[in-house]
Image: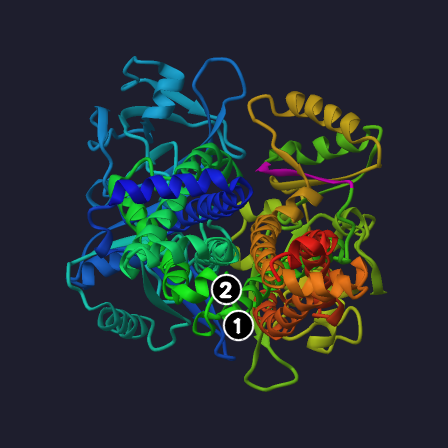
Amino acid sequence: MLTTNLKLAARNLFKNKVYSTINLLGLTIGMAACLLVATVVLDDLSYDHQWTRADNLYRIISINRDNKNVEERSSRPFLGISGELKRNFPEVTDFCGISANENRLKFAEEGQGVKVKSLSTYPSVWNMLDFTVVKGNPKTLVTGMPNLVLTEKISKQYFGEADPTGKTITSLPGYGKPKTYVITGVIKDIPANTHLRADVMVVREAKHEELYKEEYGSFSPQYVLLKPGTDIPGFTAKVNKWYNRFTGGKAKYSYAFQPIKEVYLQSDFDEGQEIKGNLRNVYVFSGVAVLLILIACINFVNLTTARALRRVKEAGMRKLLGAEKRVLVMQFLVESLLFFVLSFSMALVFYGIFLRPVEVFLGHPLTVSLAGSAGLFAVTCGSVLLVSLLTGIYPALLISAAKPVSILKGKLSVKTDTGFLRKGLVVSQFAISMLVLVATCVIQFQLHYMGTKDLGFDRNDLLTIKWTELGTQGQAFKQEVLKLNGALNASITNWYPSGGAGSMSTEIDDPRQKGNKIRVNYINGDVDLPATLKLQLADGRLFDRARPTDALNADSLQRKEWTEFEEAGKTQPALVTAYTARLLGINKMNEPVPGLRGIPIGVVKDFHNESLHHSLMPCLIQAHRDQQYGNLLVRVRPGTHAQVLKGINRLWAKFYPEKTIEYNWVSDQLDEQYRAESKLEQLFTFFSLLVLFLACLGLFGLAAFTAEQRVKEIGIRKTLGATVLQVTGLLSGDFLKLVVLAIVIASPVGWYLMNLWLQDFAYRIELQWWMFGLAGFIALLISLFTVSFQSVKAALANPVDALRTE
């Protein structure tokens, strides 16, 4: 029986080539896209699950809650907190500091070194994370210098098959003197599905720092290993109660413990974490994967039922000859299964072809894939089998349930008329397409808005040389840079656009509301910073080089106590933004403001010192001179970029031959802030095209079905004088009504969802009706083109052929 059904299914597949090609194409594209999206989602969900002790590993999160009850979460608590937890709480079995950063290492005598991702950590990391040692004995700390542990990839790349254990290499840091590392071993490559992804590990003796009751000190990422079965809510409450007692009841901070399995997907608050995902995107793309396969299955149902009328005589003859209903159902289910198996096979080919481009687009390899997991492949095959049966059961029951007499007349019985259901499915398809189109339009408009919004400073033609130790030659280097043809201005600063809110912040009393605190960000640069950024003066004056008191001697930090430096800063001239002046009630220049470190001498127009994800914050600019550490901002004349870069490289080699130079254009750095949104926009553009294509296949199927049902009606209308245009309009109008209905249904849903997405941006576009009108017009235009093909074909048919049997 199965062999017979397979032969019949294969015969029907090759007999109706156009129909079969459309069906196979829709299913193949839907399955391939679904598999790729599902792979990305499953890979995201797998992050940091591979560690043996993952269920008991937690990252310490510090929480600073302001007087407005707004939480500021940070993954960098006080360095001393983890050691104190280990001493005071038996639940903590071990702790470790783990920081992800980049190092430039010299694996060869010559050259500028190689930039590698590294983990800076303590020896206790071996007790907490699973690393497989390949060579050496890296678990034993070699004292006297930092220990370097290489991954197999790096070891083979620079040392071949030789054992590098015991060799020493140097680093080329951006600041400080070159450091020497001893290689203590090689480990297997760190899995890609971890937020601690790196090429090397730098292991040092644990840095112990006192936890100060006054709540100051160094900040660093800290991880703790807790005993199995620890009640996390209870433990957290106990820790915070202890910490409040420790600070004498004046604690500004509290602590939370984030499971290591959640770090990758739930670290939106951590702007310093480079390797992170987004849990909301996981939900979005999970929905996309389901919708893709759903639309592909709807297409299959529509196309199958559209062809049903051509097969009713076959079914009627088999019923008259004694075939039972279950036999007919089995035949159509086997046919459905054949389509799905062939489509799945072709989808696997496309999956293999496009998996690598997807990894390149994401910027990292995917650890989870069908090829790497037999269990996942088996589940996928089982899912395809189940979906094929569920999809094929509807057309199978539809045809097999009809009465033999009705079937032989070439029509289905009234009881099997499910045109309403088919139309509902098409409306659903285009409603989904409309939602994706709206999302694509809104994301594009929001990105364009952020890319073109006036930030309050000139982002173009501005070069930043990454933070480095300039030493005592900083000013001399800056002056030589200014002599280059094309260098218009320059400034040494500890802040640069896209580099965060500032170098520090403090809270002062709100003059408008007693008891309220206002956080003020501080930016330190030299007197040329406002001119280099092209800040616009609104009141007062800018820094003046001719007034030595405008700038505080930064080098005094090395000769004075911090308290003395702070006292000097309180009387230092400063610039404030217009927003700061309004908020603090600054109406007169050269008068002190209670709690503010600095005397306002000028007000500059507001500028965004953070990304547009954040609202404007009060900001104050102070000038320092003789800074030995910082970034160098250089304003370049348009058209001289290459020339200035060449000159800067030459000067750098002269002034700092032992250091590497890293620079970026500020415009590129600002665009990088919205990399996640940019990739999301590209993905939605792709998905909108894909979903529209699949939806049009479904519409094509319904158009074919309707044209076959109304072939005699069309023949009669043409015989009575109806024109091709009138017949085409008659058929197309029905479908356009469905698309319009889909637009009406999808628009309020799209409005709600996109408003939710825009809430992540402090500065955002306002949703306009024409955005939905544009998406609807695109959907209508594409659907009209799709159905017109079938409508014109039916309208051009010879009415004699349609009426011959009447």
Quadrant in the rendering for residue 58: bottom left
Badge 1 amino acid: Phe
Q: Which numbered mark, 2 or 1, is in the foreground of this view? A: 2
Count the marks: how many? 2
According to the picture, the residue beneath numbered tag 1 turns out to be 420
Quadrant in the rendering for residue 437: bottom right
Label number found at residue 27: none
- Color encoding of the figure: rainbow
Look at the image and tell me whether residue 168 can be seen: yes
Q: Which residues are magenta?
A: 461-468
Residue 264 versus residue 2 in the image, above or below: below
Relative horizontal placement of residue 24, taking residue 590 as reference (left or right) = left
Badge 2 amino acid: Lys
Residue 353 pos. (x, y %): 47, 32
Q: Is residue 292 magenta?
A: no
Q: Secondary structure at mark 1?
A: helix
Report the front residue among 494 and 27.
27
According to the picture, the residue beneath numbered tag 2 turns out to be 411
